[in-house]
Image (tube, helix red, strand yellow):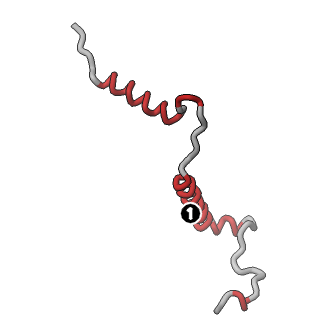
Amino acid sequence: MQIQSKALPQSFSLRREIQSYIAPAGGRGETSHPLLVFSVVALLTLFAIVEIDLHSAQLQAIGLLSHGIGIDPVFLSP
């Protein structure tokens, strides 16, 4: 006597749904939604800003980032 699990057919149907998103049927090229592309670019930009802010001391030490060196003081204040 074997006990059959209901999880197995559900996992196969989930796999089919995921594969339909990865490789669309018919071989037609799908494009990404413009809002998704904008969101990804915005999040990557914010991530880069945060990483530069976190590691600014190390970047200054190796000469990749300078704060105020060589900037005319007229441009720094209103």
Camera-side residue of 28 and 62: 28
In the image, 23: left or right of 7? right
Name, please, the residue furthest toward the left.
Answer: 1
> Residue at left 39%, top 30%?
14
Where, quadrant-wise, is the N terminus in this rendering?
top left
> Residue at left 71%, top 87%?
75
| In this view, 49 is above or below 19 | below
Circle 1 is placed at which residue position?
Answer: 46
| In this view, 52 is above or below 18 | below
> Residue at left 59%, top 65%?
49
Where, quadrant-wise, is the C terminus in this rendering?
bottom right
> Residue at left 65%, top 90%?
77
Camera-side residue of 21 and 46: 21
Q: Kindly state the secondary structure of the residue where label 1 is placed.
A: helix
In the image, 68: left or right of 9? right
Position of residue 29 measured from the top left corner of the image (x, y, whole percent): 60, 37
**Residue type of the residue flagged with mark 1:** Leu
Camera-side residue of 73 and 56: 73
Name, please, the residue furthest toward the top.
Answer: 1
Q: In the rendered image, which quarter is residue 31 located in?
A: top right
| In this view, 71 is above or below 38 | below
In the image, 6: left or right of 16? left
Q: In the rendered image, which quarter is residue 63 located in?
A: bottom right
Name, please, the residue furthest toward the right.
Answer: 70
Position of residue 3 measured from the top left corner of the image (x, y, whole percent): 23, 14
Position of residue 42 measured from the top left corner of the image (x, y, whole percent): 56, 60
Disc 1 residue crowd, few under 14, some 14–19, many 20+, Cα 10 Å = few
Position of residue 18 measured from the top left corner of the image (x, y, whole percent): 45, 33
Q: How many marks?
A: 1
In the image, 55: left or right of 5? right
| In this view, 61 is above or below 15 | below
